[in-house]
Amino acid sequence: MASWLENEEILTRKGQIAMPYAWSVGEVGSRFLVGLRDEKRILGNRCDKCGATYVPPRKNCGVCFHDLPDDGWREVGPEGVVTSCTVVREDSPLAPAKAPFAYVIVKLDGADVGFMHVVRDNLEKLAVGVRVAARFREAREGSILDIDSFVIL
Ligand SMILES: [Zn+2]
């Protein structure tokens, strides 16, 4: 059976849509974000089987797959060491900060994994190995951006 498409091609049309959404961060994510919002504390959780401490916290250990215990919560940071960084010099509507800023991975004191965030100031001093500290926003709403940024010490 002949189709009218035999001699045609499927056309495409480019466009953009805005898609508002709500996403549950779950029990573990909620506890982490409430710690930021209400106490200006960065909470991680520790695996009682292998000892790894995660921030952001996880439901299960990424090393040994053990369920992380309810009594494994602990405060980490607010200081740490930059383990990776890249400077952003062009604004983007999806970026968490106005350029120039830097994405950084920080190994917070007391944690065993990297925590991704941003540095806004003194970018000329930014390098792997520098110590940084979390700077919290005065108005917090239960978001990762309740930490405004990390500042170089
Ligand atoms: Zn583990």
Image: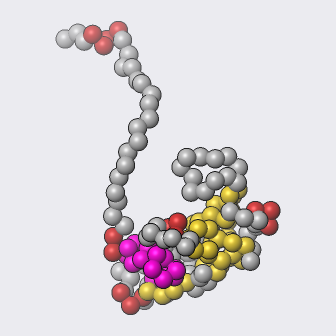
| Percent coordinates x, y for residue 97 in the rendering | 61, 56
Q: How is the image coloured?
A: secondary structure
Relative to 50, 93 lies left or right: right
| Percent coordinates x, y for residue 89 in the rendering | 70, 49
42 drawn magenta: yes
Identify the residue shown where x is 62% and y is 68%: 149
Identify the residue shown where x is 36% and y is 11%: 8
| Percent coordinates x, y for residue 90 in the rendering | 67, 46
Residue 142 visible at all: yes
Residue range in magenta is 28-45
Residue 6, quarter of the rendered image: top left
Between 93 and 28, the residue placed more toward the observer is 93
65 drawn magenta: no
Residue 38, quarter of the rendered image: bottom left
Q: Residue furthest left?
A: 1
Between 136 and 133, the residue placed more toward the observer is 136
Between 86 and 94, the residue placed more toward the observer is 94
Relative to 63, 128 lies left or right: right
Pick the quarter of the image with the N terminus.
top left
Residue 117, quarter of the rendered image: bottom right
